[in-house]
C-alpha cells in the first residue's frame, strides 16, 4: 500500500514531463504582468513615489530596514518601476527566466508593501503564487529565447519536473472548490440579489448598468447565481477528467469573460490560460 | 538527486498541508495551523463574499484660515476605476489588523493629505474625513448621490 502510494506520488509529482503547458502559462503570466504594468504606469507618481499619499504597509522606522519603504522621489520610483517591466518582458520571452521571475517577485513585494497592500485581493495572491511556482519550473524550456539560443529553434524543448505544473493545477482546483463551498453557504449568496447589485455597484461596467436598466426579473439573477454555484462545484472535478476538460475550459472561460464584461475585473482572465496546467501536451519521450 | 527529490516532496507535502488547512478554515472557520500562516492561502479561495446596497466614497474637508471648511478633491490621489478607488479608501489592509491600526491608518492618511495639499499651495489648519454613502441605481453610479439620499458616516466605525 505504502509502496503503491509512493509510486503514485513519484509518478504524479516527480516524473519529467514536456514543458509546453508551463510555457503557455509563462507567456500568459508575462503578458498579464505587462498589462498590469501599463495599467499603473500613469499613476507611478501617486502610488509609488513621494508625490502621492504615502501609505506603506509598515510605517518606516529610521535606522531599520523598513526605511526602504519610504516612498522615493518620482525619478527613482519610475526607474524601479522600469525594472518590473524588464522582468515581465523576460518572463514573456523566456529570457533569463529565473532571474526575471525573482526580480519580478521582489519588485511586486516592494510595490505591494508600498501601495498594493490596500488593493490585495484573491487575484493578486494567485498571480504572485503562480509567479513563484513558475519561476522554479523550467517554464522557459520551450517557446523561449533560451531555447532559440541553445537549439536555434523556438519550439525545441527539454523535459521538466512535473510538480510545478501539478501544484498550479491543484491550486486552481482548491480556489474553485473553496470559492464554491463558500458561495454554497454564505448568507449573501442565497439569492440572486448579490448579482443584481453587482450590475450597479462601483465595479460595474457601462454594459452592466445598461443590462440592469432592462429591469430583468429576479428569476434571471437567481438562476445565474445557481449556475455559478453549480459551475464552481463541477470545475474542481471536471478540469481533471480529459473527457470533460474542453467543456470545463469553455465554461470557466465564459465565466471569467462574463466577470470581465460585467465588473471589469479582467485580471481573472489569467486563469483561462492557466487551465493548461491540467493538460500534458506532449510525452517526454518524444523530445524534439 | 535522491536528496533533492526528498526535499521537493517535503515542500509539496507542506504546501498540501497548508492548503488543506486553508480549505478547512474556509468551510469550518477552524484550522490546525494559526490563522496568520494560512491567511495567504485562504485569500486565494476567498470569493466576493457579500454585498452592499449603497455606494461609498471617502470625503476629505480642510479648514481654511478663516475657519470655513472646504472639500478637498481626493480623485487625483486615488486614480483608477471606482471599484479600486473605494477598495483603497477603506484601508482594508489596516482594517484587517483591527480598530487601532485602522485609526492610525486614517491619521496617517490625513497627515499625507495635509503634506500633499500644502505642496499644491493649499494649507489647512485641520482636515477631517468621512464616507458619503448613497443607494446604488441602475442609471448610474452617482444618480442617487443627492442630499436626500446621501448619508455621511464615520470612516472607523462605518456608522
Image (cartoon, rainbow, N blue to C red):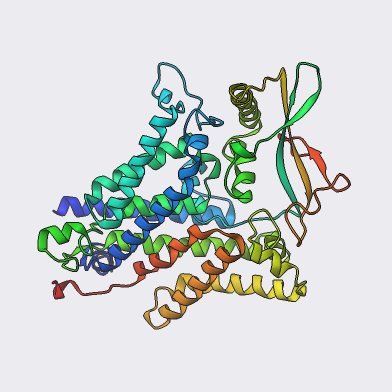
**Residue at horizontal 44 percent and vertical 17 percent from the top:** A62
Closer to us: A103 or A185: A103
Residue A284: x and y in percent read 17, 71
Residue A50: x and y in percent read 49, 27
Closer to us: B8 or A260: A260
Residue A232: x and y in percent read 54, 69
**Residue at horizontal 19 percent and vertical 69 percent from the top:** A155
Q: Which residue lies furthest to the left in this view?
A: A151
- Compared to B112, does A147 lie above or below? below
Q: Residue furthest front?
A: B121
Residue A11: x and y in percent read 24, 68
Quadrant assignment, res B104: top right
* In the displayed structure image, the side of residue A137 where residue A243 appears, left or right: right
Closer to us: A186 or A82: A82
* Total marks placed: 0
Camera sees residue B79? yes
Q: Quadrant of the C terminus of chain A?
A: bottom left
Quadrant assignment, res A16: bottom left
Camera sees residue B34? no
Q: In which quarter of the image is the N terminus of chain A?
A: bottom left
- Compared to B102, does A257 lie above or below? below
Q: Residue furthest bottom?
A: A243
Q: Residue furthest right?
A: B148
Quadrant assignment, res A246: bottom left
**Residue at horizontal 37 percent and vertical 55 percent from the top:** A130
* In the displayed structure image, the side of residue A272 where residue A198 appears, left or right: right
**Residue at horizontal 84 percent and vertical 47 percent from the top:** B146
Amino acid at each position: 500500500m505504502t509502496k503503491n502510494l509512493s509510486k503514485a506520488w513519484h509518478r504524479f509529482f516527480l516524473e519529467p514531463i514536456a514543458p509546453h503547458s508551463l510555457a503557455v502559462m509563462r507567456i500568459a503570466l508575462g503578458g498579464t504582468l505587462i498589462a498590469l504594468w501599463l495599467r499603473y504606469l500613469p499613476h507611478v507618481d501617486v502610488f509609488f513615489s513621494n508625490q502621492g499619499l504615502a501609505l506603506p504597509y509598515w510605517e518606516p522606522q529610521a535606522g531599520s530596514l523598513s526605511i526602504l519603504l519610504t516612498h522615493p522621489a518620482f525619478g527613482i520610483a519610475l526607474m524601479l518601476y522600469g525594472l518590473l517591466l524588464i522582468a515581465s518582458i523576460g518572463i514573456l520571452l523566456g529570457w533569463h527566466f529565473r532571474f526575471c521571475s525573482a526580480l519580478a517577485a521582489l519588485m511586486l513585494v516592494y510595490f505591494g508593501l508600498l501601495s498594493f497592500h490596500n488593493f490585495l485581493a484573491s487575484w493578486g495572491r494567485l498571480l504572485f503564487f503562480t509567479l513563484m511556482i513558475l519561476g522554479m519550473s523550467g517554464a522557459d524550456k520551450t517557446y523561449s529565447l533560451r531555447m532559440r539560443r541553445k537549439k536555434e529553434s523556438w519550439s525545441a524543448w527539454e523535459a521538466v519536473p512535473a510538480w510545478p505544473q501539478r501544484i498550479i493545477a491543484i491550486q486552481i482546483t482548491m480556489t474553485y472548490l473553496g470559492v464554491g463551498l463558500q458561495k454554497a453557504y454564505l448568507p449573501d449568496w442565497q439569492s440572486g440579489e448579490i448579482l443584481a447589485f453587482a450590475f450597479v455597484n462601483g465595479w460595474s461596467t457601462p454594459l452592466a448598468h445598461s443590462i440592469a436598466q432592462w429591469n430583468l426579473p429576479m428569476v434571471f439573477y437567481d438562476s445565474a447565481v445557481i449556475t455559478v454555484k453549480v459551475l464552481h462545484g463541477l470545475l474542481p472535478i471536471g478540469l481533471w477528467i480529459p473527457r470533460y476538460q474542453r467543456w470545463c475550459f469553455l465554461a470557466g472561460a465564459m465565466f471569467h469573460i462574463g466577470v470581465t464584461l460585467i465588473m471589469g475585473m479582467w485580471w481573472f482572465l489569467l486563469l483561462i490560460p492557466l487551465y493548461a496546467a491540467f493538460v500534458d501536451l506532449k510525452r517526454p519521450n518524444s523530445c524534439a | 538527486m535522491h536528496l533533492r527529490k526528498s526535499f521537493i516532496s517535503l515542500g509539496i507535502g507542506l504546501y498540501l498541508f497548508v492548503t488543506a488547512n486553508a480549505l478547512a478554515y474556509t468551510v469550518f472557520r477552524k484550522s490546525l495551523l494559526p490563522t496568520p500562516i494560512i491567511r495567504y492561502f485562504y485569500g486565494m479561495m476567498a470569493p466576493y463574499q457579500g454585498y452592499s446596497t449603497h455606494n461609498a466614497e471617502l470625503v476629505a474637508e480642510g479648514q481654511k484660515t478663516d475657519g470655513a471648511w472646504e472639500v478637498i478633491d481626493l480623485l487625483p490621489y486615488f486614480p483608477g476605476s471606482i471599484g479600486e478607488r473605494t477598495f483603497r479608501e477603506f484601508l482594508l489592509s489596516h482594517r484587517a489588523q483591527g480598530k487601532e491600526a485602522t485609526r492610525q491608518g486614517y491619521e496617517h492618511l490625513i497627515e499625507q493629505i495635509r503634506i500633499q495639499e500644502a505642496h499644491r499651495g493649499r494649507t489647512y489648519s485641520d482636515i477631517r474625513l468621512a464616507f458619503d454613502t448613497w443607494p446604488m441605481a441602475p442609471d448610474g453610479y452617482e444618480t442617487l448621490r443627492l442630499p436626500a439620499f446621501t448619508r455621511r458616516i464615520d470612516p472607523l466605525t462605518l456608522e
